[in-house]
Amino acid sequence: MARSFTEDEVRQMIADAVAKAVAPLKARIAELEAENARLKKNSATSSKPPSSDIVKPPRPKPSGGKRGKRRGGGQPQHPRHLRPLFPPEEVDKTWLYEWTTVPPGWKPLKRFRVLQQAELVEKPYQVTEHRARLYENLRTGQVLAAPLPSEVRQAGLLGPRLTALVAYQKGACHMSIETIRKFLGDVLHLPISHGQVVKTVQKVSAALGPCYEQLQKALPQQEYMGIDETGHPERGRGLWSWCFHVPGSDRFTWFHIDPSRGSKVLKRCLGKAFRGIIGCDYYSAYRKFLRETNVWLQLCWAHLIRDVKYLTTLSNRATRGYGNRLLGKIKTLFRTWHRRHETPADRWERAATKARREVLSVARRAPTASEAQNIAKRFREHGDAYFTFLDTPGIEPTNNGPERQIRFLTIDRKITQGTRGEAGRRWCERIWTVLATCAQQGRSAFKFIYHSVTAHFKNQPFPSLLPLPP
């Protein structure tokens, strides 16, 4: 016997059927929205480099047409900058121009309009020939040469300054071996083989070795450093370039290439007894190193803020609200931090404590969405590591220092396509360390390379990149 249904039962059956049919569609829509948000990630909402922002929307044009648009070149009211003249001791030749006949009513002054011009000489190098007299043994017929100076024998074809130039071109200018060979032949009129350039680079690598090892030994004694890593290709293998950046105009930056991206690299380079503070991102190797040692971390706020901004682009309303609330509290925290020098100490400490408490309170109360829960988990497990900079003077809240140093490596990697073996790795580690540290200390990298090469050829003490003791 057929059963009759009431109107309410029929309405409920229809609603259940519709819900059952729509449920997979809603799930698919949510999946596509999440995928769309992931694909739209850019350098502002993730750790992607700015060069990858092919989907980043263009900046809105200023209202009012051309109003506010800057012209190219110098801006109105901008002070003019003139290059200073070469001092007299650096001027090699002077030409004097005068009127041959001074017209009536004019008299010569003891002032001049000066235009200094620098020019390459036709042959910008000199060739020194070292002759060692040969001697023959009258009894045995053996022929021996008088000994050449050690620095002459070790230098070979290229002297110390030209050797340093080749190394500077290879390291600082990202020039290939073939490009250096062409430059020496076309510009300096110095024909040289491919193999000779390679030998020259390896001589400089050996000359920089003692200084590099000295910085490596000094690394575990540092109180604070930022660390970051990036990929390094070698014959199809994926290696890792590690950057250890000790901030300060009298400190240093040290690079290391390793097959591993794990915490064992930190243990080898810093040792388990390291007691300093490490600025880093949220990568698992640093958190494992934290668990196994007594090190302190300062987790990078720039990485975190990008991840929180990503939450504000998602379709889920609760997740977007969570991201916006957290961003608001983070802005309050950093407004407080930037006022630390203009606020009385006790008042600033109260304000910083309050801002920190509010960030943690909002961060740990996340909606159920996985993206929000990931952020909340960071603060539950490592919340204190985000606030080290509040309690320790001189600690930066971001890891921008080593990231700036790594930009040079990424450019070098794209141009040179990495290394081919152990010798290439050692060269890269040493020249990157010298270039970054010299720039950090305001020193000439070329002069340091030259002095290192000279000391190496003459078996003299090597120059150091460590600060002199007080």
Image (spheres, rainbow, N blue to C red):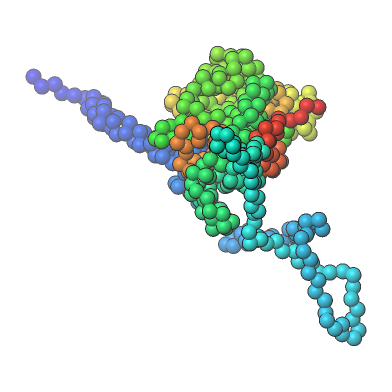
Percent position of residue 181, x then y: 52, 51
Q: Position of residue 441 (x, y in %)?
A: 71, 37
Q: Quadrant of the C terminus?
A: top right
Residue lying furthest front in this view?
139
Q: Quadrant of the N terminus?
A: top left
Q: Name the foreground residue: 375 vs 216.
A: 216
* Residue at image location 64% in from the left, 56% down from the top: 124
State the residue at coordinates (10%, 22%).
2
- For the image, the number of numbered tags is 0
Q: Residue at x 64, y 49 (%)?
A: 129
Location of residue 237 by image quarter: top left
- Across and down, in percent, residue 64 comes to 59, 60
> In the drawing, does residue 234 fall left or right of residue 138?
left
Residue 267 location, quadrant: top right
Instruction: Quadrant for residue 379, please give it.
Output: top right
- Vertically, is 350 above or below 45? above
Residue 152 lies, with reference to residue 13, above or below; the image says: below
Nearest to the observer: residue 360 or residue 400: 400
User: Is residue 314 among what the camera can see?
Assistant: no
Using the image as rendered, state which of residue 37 and residue 125 is in the foreground. Answer: 125
Q: Is residue 234 above or below residue 274?
A: below
Considering depth in this image, is 465 or 308 the residue closer to the camera?
465
Rendered view: 78 above or below 362 = below
Q: Residue 176: percent from the left, percent from the top?
A: 50, 47
Q: Residue furthest bottom?
A: 104
